[in-house]
Image (cartoon, rainbow, N blue to C red):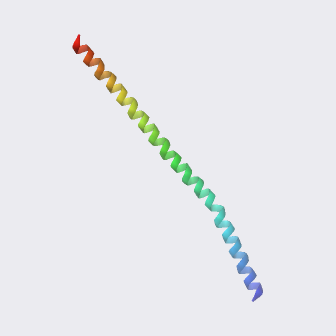
Amino acid sequence: MTARRSRLAACGVLATALACGRVPEQALRDEQARARRYRDAYETTAAELAAAKARLAEVEKSCSAKRQ
């Protein structure tokens, strides 16, 4: 009975060690996914801002051309 308990305990320790080894990897993948989402959102906002500035410049140019 003692040998069986020691084997079960060893399996439990091994399972815990393996499970703990995966947690940082998953956390890293989650953090990388969050970083990609933030980067994509930043790039999208920057592109939208650039398009809005270009459109504003066109409108200002057409307004000043009409005044003259």
Counting the numbered discs, the total is 0
Which residue extends farthest bottom?
1
The N terminus appears in which quarter of the rendering?
A: bottom right
Specify the quadrant of the image occupied by residue 61. Answer: top left
Specify the quadrant of the image occupied by residue 44. Answer: top left
Give the side of residue 57 with respect to residue 63, left or right: right
Give the side of residue 26 with respect to residue 8, left or right: left
Towards the viewer: 54 or 60? 60
Question: How far across and down, in percent of the image, does residue 11 sit?
Answer: 70, 75
Q: Is residue 48 above or below residue 30?
A: above
Q: Residue at x 48, y 46 (%)?
A: 37
Question: How far across and down, in percent of the image, does residue 67 sit?
Answer: 22, 13
Question: How far across and down, in percent of the image, does residue 32 sit?
Answer: 56, 49
Q: Is residue 9 above or below residue 62?
A: below
Q: Residue at x 43, y 34 (%)?
A: 46
Q: Residue at x 58, y 56 (%)?
A: 27
Q: Residue at x 67, y 71 (%)?
A: 15
Q: Is residue 5 above or below residue 63?
A: below
